[in-house]
Image (spheres, helix red, strand yellow):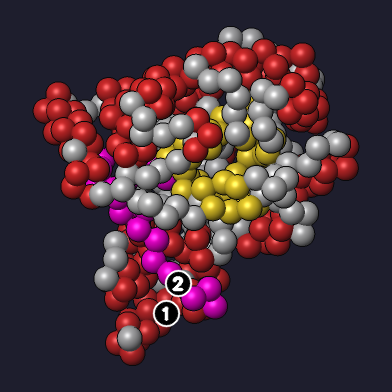
Amino acid sequence: MKLLSVLIILILILRKLTPCRGDDHPSRQASKPHAAEAKSLSEEELRRKIEELRSAKEKYGELDNMTYVELSDGGKMPVLALGTAMLEPALIAPVVSAALDLGYRAVDAAYVYGNEREVGSALRDKMRDGTVTRSELFIINKLWSTFHRRDLVEKACRQSLDAMGLDYFDLYLIHNPMSFKEGPNPLPKIANVLQYSEHDYLEAWYGIEGLVKKGLVKRGGLSNFNSVQIERVMDKGWIKPVVNQVECHPYLTQLRLEEFCLARNIKLSCFGVLGSKGTPPELTSGLPPVIDDPLVKVMAAGLGITPAQLLISYQHALGRSVVVKCSSASHLAQARAVVPLARRTWRRSTPSTATRGCSPSPEWATHIGTTRSGLRFNFIH
């Protein structure tokens, strides 16, 4: 451990913090829906992955002690959820099936991912074969930005429920606070400029309150919201959000946002906990993804775990739930293997004090972050 500490100190000394460029802003990244971003695999790669996923339970066993976080309404949410964004279409059913076989009980979906029907079909198959019951599952879905007008919220929710073949969602989030022009295009543009709606996220929240009343969703929450936006929802709404789902990792610790949320009984849920290895080079600041950071690698090696396990365990040590996206059985199994970490030791030893995020551009700050608060969010996960 002494050698590990010395290596960590050396890496921290050698690390050169680089300010992010103007291109490294969410407003430069909102160019295409998630459904179109999945990387295509060869037929042989798909075949191998599917075979591995089908034998996941036999090889890795089922997790029988899932941990839960208690929400302000008394409900319980699993600390680990399977993310379904940008999954290869042919892998959706095998991944969802394998995750449930391995003990996952929460699934994170969204209209804009373009795969609700496939995810829902896989869930229903596992309910039919007796692997899980509906009451054991915690299904999260999200209201997209073109449906923020109050009269469109229920329509959007029912459309998602119908696509997934479900009667209700356990948690329904406003995907992000930006309100886009209503219509069939998820990213409406004129001359490559996003078109915004005159209706904002507060109308969307009123609509979600109506969904709770009707039993279409059990509870509502937020995603990618900053403190000012959360406060507005808290002040104007009669139902309080139970979750704010945001990007979290050692480069973007969200400690200030978490403090704000916890003071209002809102749990922080995290996506992008491994960083984003898929971001084009021209949209990055030239720094390695979090999972490739030398300090993360050294610490993981010292603990005898993978960098991914370390980064997921970091969030759990902070008391947060995590959304993970995995397309292989081995990664699904690794993600559920949380390693107990002492919070005070972890926060002292990691890059937490060297957050590499950046304040958003003035254009984006209006919607997502503020330079005053110093918060920075990616577009959507």
Q: Is residue 328 above or below residue 374?
A: above
Q: What residue would you read off at disc 2?
A: 341
Rendered-image quadrant of the N terminus: bottom left
How far across and down, in percent of the image, does residue 112 sit? 52, 23
SS for tag 1? helix
| 2 or 1: tag closer to the N-terminus | 1
Q: What residue would you read off at disc 1?
A: 13
Measure how far apart labels 2 and 1 are at the Cα level.
Answer: 24 Å
Q: Would residue 102 be visible to someone looking at this image?
A: yes
Residue in view at x 49 percent, y 36 percent: 137
Residue 325 within the magenta-colored segment of the rendering: yes
Residue farthest along the front direction in this orientation: 130
SS for tag 2? loop
Residue in view at x 53 percent, y 20 percent: 166
How far across and down, in percent of the image, does residue 33 sit? 48, 24
The three-letter code of the residue at mark 1 reads Ile
Residue in view at x 74 percent, y 54 percent: 265
* Segment colored magenta: 324-344
Q: Is residue 313 above or below residue 215?
A: below
